[in-house]
Amino acid sequence: MIDRMREVFTAIQAWIFEAAVQPVMFSLGLMAYAEDAYEGLGMAMVGVIEIAVLVALFKPLEAWRPVEQWAEKRAVRTDVIYTWLNRLGVLPLAIFLLLVIPVNELEIWLRMHGIVRPNIEDVMPWIERNSIGAFLIYLLLLDFVEYWVHRGQHQLNWWWALHSLHHSQRQMTFWADDRNHLLDDVITSAAVAVAALIIGVPSGQFFLIIIAGRMIESLSHANARVSFGWLGERLLVSPKFHRAHHAIGVGHEGAYRGCNFAVLFPLWDIVFRTANFQSAYEPTGIRDQLQGRDYGIGFWRQQWLGLVRLKASFRGAS
Amino acid sequence: MFNKIKYLRNFAVIALLAVANVWAQQAQQGVAFVLNSNDDTMSLIDTRTYKEISRERVGREPHHVMLTPDGKSLIVGSVQSHDLMFYDPVTGKFQKRIDKIIDPYQLAFSHDRKWFVTAALALDRVDIYSADDYKLVKRIVTRSGPSHLVFSTDNRHVFVTLQHTNNIAIIDLIDQKLVATVPVGKQPAGIWITPDDKHVLVGVMGEDFVAVVDWRARKVVQRIRTGAGAHNFIPMGDRKRILVTNRAANTVSIIDMDTFKVLETFRVPGGPDCMELTADGKELWVTSRWIQKVTVIDMDTKKIKTQIPVGRSPHGIFFNHHAPRF
């Protein structure tokens, strides 16, 4: 069954590539990047399937056990735009084009200075022949990196100026996962890409890690009263656990400027004492929104205001 | 009675010879190795049944294979794990791994077995190793996407396609330096040398031709129109004809290396890339990258005989009973 699905997927991917993508690349003199384009097309197709799965699974979930209900949903529609841009690969492509040269230069510099990337397979040779084990280890390591990136997004004023856009959604649904400032996306992608380079995540695994991560992250933003139980809440980030991270006050204030920073595994919050299992389905948003601060409703307005906040943060304002 | 014994003896000899012939053929045939670049795996395919026997994990992002000069090992170069993995070329049994070989996208031994040269496509350099111990002797920074390589007959020069600057590089292996670059066309990929050592053939992937380079005069003397995305070569074992894949056109062309004329072009779907031709010239095995299959062409009819599903982005291919390379 899975083989058959993969076969159909590949046939469609090859057909679209040969009919539409490759001729354009050929005419633009970009055939040297044909493999990258083919992979990018695959990612975009996976993105479309992902969105279909998200709608099929999480829409009914949100309708079944909603935390909140709203009459006006314009803010959610903007999040849908972010999701399509991300899952279709438009933003990842732009970020890739921005980062490919510096990341490659970094790789060349490391090689020229005799610094050989550590191979996890060298330390743990058994994972070379155990794809599931390798996948889980890479997933855990990258999640660790993302935990600390996320801590930085809350801790550093200039970074919070951008990241606060993600937290400003007061109608949080599964679409909210991709709602980020573009500059925030570039910075976090760069950090994760450099980490992936240093850790040495294989390209095939990276693809799966991104898909698995995105599905869990979308679920964790769902407007649903869903908890994974005492043990489950400690194993995987749930809608309940992540809602505390988005809660007004507790989600962005206090000693650590928030709680529940983990993206996939609450383990990191437990280890670094930032976990909060007490909060229960609080309203989401940022406290200054209650005093009337505007974070924008439409896509461009949100992006612009993010830059305004960034500039203000450099002057010492919050 | 005597005649009967003689008859039986002759029958037994003939029967034994027939069995020996079958064994010899079977020993000659065997396993095809296909590198699945985006899966970090190698498919081992039974060349008699056209079935995938197994799929082995190799290094990260393997691209090309090369037989060692003694024929005892097949080397798989992996560009992300920066290593070479050695396998028995008949059985596929793993032999050893050599690490710290940087970005070995394409690999080749000089004919005198002195040098092992790699083209680092992503990291922009050509590395010259001693073929005895795989120790780095010289690193030549090209800054231009070195892709495929071939040696001159006298082993003095190695020619390397430079994908990002539309040139080929000529590297002198005695002085161990880049001595010239020759513009050939957009995104040159595969490269081969004619048996008379006079011309270098270059698959110009960003265009629809094979460039014929008089490498001593350092200029393109002819363009052979084959098809869009001319890519990689494999000789047909008769010192006269060579095959080239046309990746965007989904075809393979046969070129006469004496006249530089296209003798025939036939369809091979799915982005044909690397090839291997059986010693009897009857089957052409081609990696079809976009459809994740190996396409086997019946060379009598030039039609698809079968297609074998493999992993993602199948690239390098090898089997032991291939046509002579010269």
Image (spheres, helix red, strand yellow):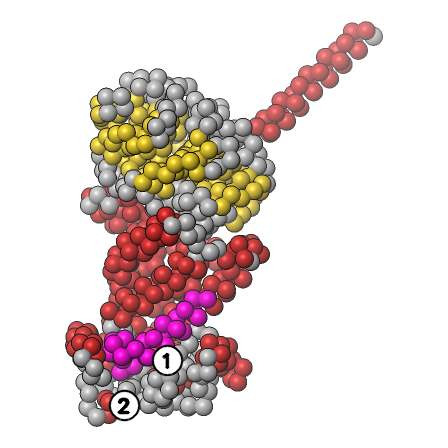
Q: Give the residue at mark 2.
A: A287
Q: Is residue A301 above or below residue A192?
A: below
Magenta stretch secondary structure, dominant: helix
Name the residue: 28% across, 87% down: A286
Residue A192 relative to residue B9: left or right: left
| Image x and y of residue A297, in percent | 19, 80
Q: Is residue B325 above or below residue B297?
A: above
Q: Which residues are magenta?
A: A141-169
Q: CA distance from mark 1 to mark 2?
A: 21 Å
Determine which of the numbered discs, if any, sits on residue A55 in the image: none
State the quadrant of the C terminus of chain A: bottom left
Q: Amino acid at mark 2?
A: Arg
Q: Is residue B239 above or below residue A218?
A: above
Residue A99: which quarter of the image?
A: bottom left
In the rendered structure, which disc, 1 or 2, sits on the residue that comes first in sequence? Answer: 1
| Image x and y of residue A276, in percent | 44, 86
Residue A180 relative to residue A238: left or right: left
Residue A182: which quarter of the image?
A: bottom left
Residue furthest bottom in the image: A291
Instruction: Please give the chain letter of the residue carrying mark 1.
Output: A
Residue B52 relative to residue B181: left or right: right
